[in-house]
Amino acid sequence: MKTKLIPRDYQTSSYNDIKKSFAKGNKHICLMMCGGAGKSLLCKMIIDSALSKGSKVGFFSFRKSLTEQIKTYFNNVDNIDIGTLQKFGKSETKMYDLIILDEKDFTNTKLRSNIKSKYSIVMSGCPTDTTGNVLEFDDIVEGIQYIDLYKKGYAKKIKVLAISKIDTSKLKKVAGDFRKKDSFDIMEKPTIKKNIIESYKKYCINRKSLLFAVDINHAESLKKEFLENGIKCDTVHSKKKSDNIIKDFEDGKFDLLINVAQISIGVDIPCINTIIFARPMVSMPLMLQCVWRGTRKFKDDYCLVLDLAEVLKRVNFHPVQKIDFTKTKATKKQKECCSQPMIILSKTNKMIDDLTYMQTTRYKCNACNKYEDKEEMKVLNLKFCAGCGEQLTDNKIEFKETKKELVFYIECECCKFINPERSILLTDKELKEIKHNEILQGADTWEKLRLILLEECRKWKYHSKYADRLIEMLKLKEIPMNVIMDNVAKIKANNIKISALGYL
């Protein structure tokens, strides 16, 4: 005999809010519920209500594991179709009275458009695009967000540790996220893999960890590295069956599971208490889905998010923040009041804990003198000395130049160990720029003078060719370089236009 499931308070209120939204005339709505909030039971409540009225209902998802969860509630029940979008959306369907779609990823595809319905509900943990702009629905019903779920005692606390040693600023994006080939190239470097292993040993031993890798090759490469370092682990991806592997992970045969796009949506493994980002990403919904794999309530535990790939920095969203449902693509970046932009007066930072701080930006309207504060939670991107383990500070970054690259490093204040930060292989253009800088630091030359004059041309809004004409004229007059440079220094000191050089 099955135990009767009793809905939680927020599930009941969400159910009632959905009915109210339909009563207002909305036909295609979205229900936002964070991971681990119990969407399956709420789906059952909605479907039970629709079936009791004789409605034709459909439940569809792009993942088979999600449809199997719902099927357990409705074995041998008429008037309902449950299955994948890939199967039911191949061709145009008959008209359903109500359909429920789990997750938003396929809501604007041909598969979705083939499924006809009078009413629809999209169940989503984060109904936004990759940058956090809310998607268009007739209505969005806010079920429960993570921070409220945690406060009610149904989710683990989240702690974030960002110790990335990579620079993702130059990675190219495709379809709203970083290109996998570029991500693989940067994460497959021996120094980066070594950092992943060392970080795991320092923070994750005896914790049930789920690591997100770039692709299958990266996952298998990391597995080999971990095994060689005596760390038991396994991989799950599209080229191998995962059921037995996940069971062995849950049973404690190993504590590290390396995942490629198999455990991010709709898979519940409550024992996971550590999420490791070893792949760059810029998608806010994807980041949250990954984090929520580790927030399921399980004993008296917390979820450690170990960011080794600048994920939090690029997404610019802390996983304990609430999703802003007023942010859309049409939202202006600059705050406005009285139909004009507000000015920024100040920015202050307040530490929340050792790893997290709140940044408060104060705005002012010059028209009505109104003040407004905007708070954003941010994560410290920490770095630690490989010599003594003490925290390093970014303001100590220095660099050394070779003929082909710039090598950035941080010298530890405690043990003076030189910690490599990153290296940049220089292009011909960058090498020329360095050469110009070297010239500026050396003796007075025509090239040095040209660079100074070009800067002055920009300052006084002259055409850049004016600098070359001045140099040609000075060369014809055969004026000694030391005399020219002395006059240039006087001109700059007195804020005089460089055309004064023409009178030498």
Image (cartoon, helix red, strand yellow):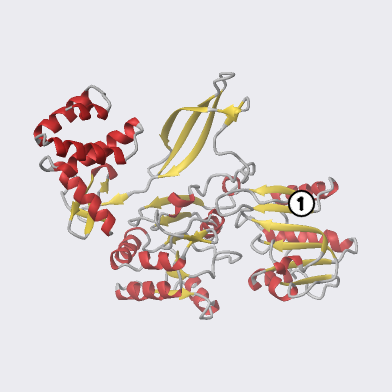
* 74 with respect to 220 (left or right): right
**Which image quarter holds the N terminus?**
bottom right
Name above or below for residue 186 compared with residue 344: below
Residue 463 location, x and y as percent? Answer: 34, 38
Outermost residue toward the right in this view: 54
Residue 212 location, x and y as percent? Answer: 46, 65
Q: From the viewer's side, name the closer residue of 41 and 417.
A: 417
Residue 142 location, x and y as percent? Answer: 68, 47
Outermost residue toward the top in this view: 368
* 491 with respect to 462 (left or right): left
Instruction: Give residue 253's quadrant in the image.
Output: bottom left
Q: Residue at x 84, y 45 (%)?
A: 24
Residue 433 in view, yes or no = yes
Q: Residue at x 20, y 40 (%)?
A: 472
Judging by the rendered image, the residue that carries numbered circle 1 is 15
Outermost residue toward the front in this view: 476
Residue 433 location, x and y as percent? Answer: 25, 50
